[in-house]
Amino acid sequence: MPTGANALDRLGPVFRWREARRAGMSDPALHRMLAEGRLERISHGLYLQVDSEFADVADLDLVVVAAANDRSTLCLTSALARHDLTDEIPTRIDVALPRGTRLPKVSAPVRWHRFAPATFDLGREVIELHAGYSIGVYSPERSIVDAYRLRHLEGDELGREALKAWLRQWGSQPSRLLQVAAPFPKALGRLREDMRVLL
């Protein structure tokens, strides 16, 4: 059976406990490496090899979220910031999961949102992270629509400012945004009004 160190060589910089067991790492070896500072527990059942290049990468929190649930999707302010549609710097990561999904416990600073399963995948894209992980992110259009439909939580300015930024970049394609908004009647009316004023 491989030693703990040999098992580490067969694992990525971030790994789950079950992956470590499959690689041949025992419980005592894992606890010893945690005590020695060679590993860091970054979330429930998720570990980081401290001396890996990945240890300094800024999106480690995103990996934690992605590892917790493969349907995790960046939304609202976090998605808008990723698309350069807001100047706001999120203090927490806005992450959507389909309604009815159990919300995972993670060490990352996350604000969870539950979106309707019927429209959850509308405008959902996937981006690659480090260590073989990926996470969903809503398209610029879907992110604007969500800011409008959840303005009772986010305030009116988040969506309006994102719309202005989007129009500066893609102003000749308002039908694209309205098409994404069509399944969300709460957002569609206000979005149309603001587009009429801004165009």
Image (cartoon, rainbow, N blue to C red):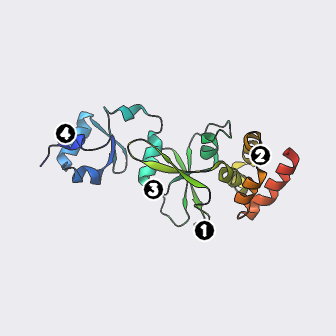
Q: Residue lying at the far front in this picture: please name it.
A: 172
Q: Amino acid at mark 4?
A: Ala
How many residues crowd around disc 4 within 10 Å: few (fewer than 14), some, or many (20 or more)?
Answer: some
The Cα–Cα distance between marks 1 and 4, rounded to whole angstroms, is: 46 Å
Q: Residue lying at the far right in this picture: please name it.
A: 197
Instruction: Tell me the quadrant of the picture where the C terminus can be found.
Output: top right
State the residue position of label 4: 5
Q: Earlier in the sequence, mark 4 or mark 2?
A: 4
Q: Is residue 34 above or below residue 138?
A: above
The Cα–Cα distance between marks 3 and 4, rounded to whole angstroms, is: 28 Å
Q: How far across and how far down the image is residue 182, in percent?
A: 73, 63
Labelled disc at residue 160 = 2
| CB under 8 Å between discs 4 and 2 | no
How many numbered markers are drawn? 4
State the residue at coordinates (62%, 64%).
119
Q: How far across and how far down the image is residue 138, in percent?
A: 60, 51
The Cα–Cα distance between marks 2 and 1, rounded to whole angstroms, is: 26 Å
State the residue position of label 3: 70
Q: Amino acid at mark 2?
A: Arg
Helix, strand or loop at disc 4? helix
Q: Is residue 33 above or below residue 117?
A: above
State the residue position of label 1: 118
Q: Amino acid at mark 3?
A: Asp
Q: Earlier in the sequence, mark 3 or mark 2?
A: 3
State the residue at coordinates (26%, 39%).
34
| CB under 8 Å between discs 2 and 1 | no
Q: Amino acid at mark 1?
A: Ala
The Cα–Cα distance between marks 1 and 3, rounded to whole angstroms, is: 17 Å
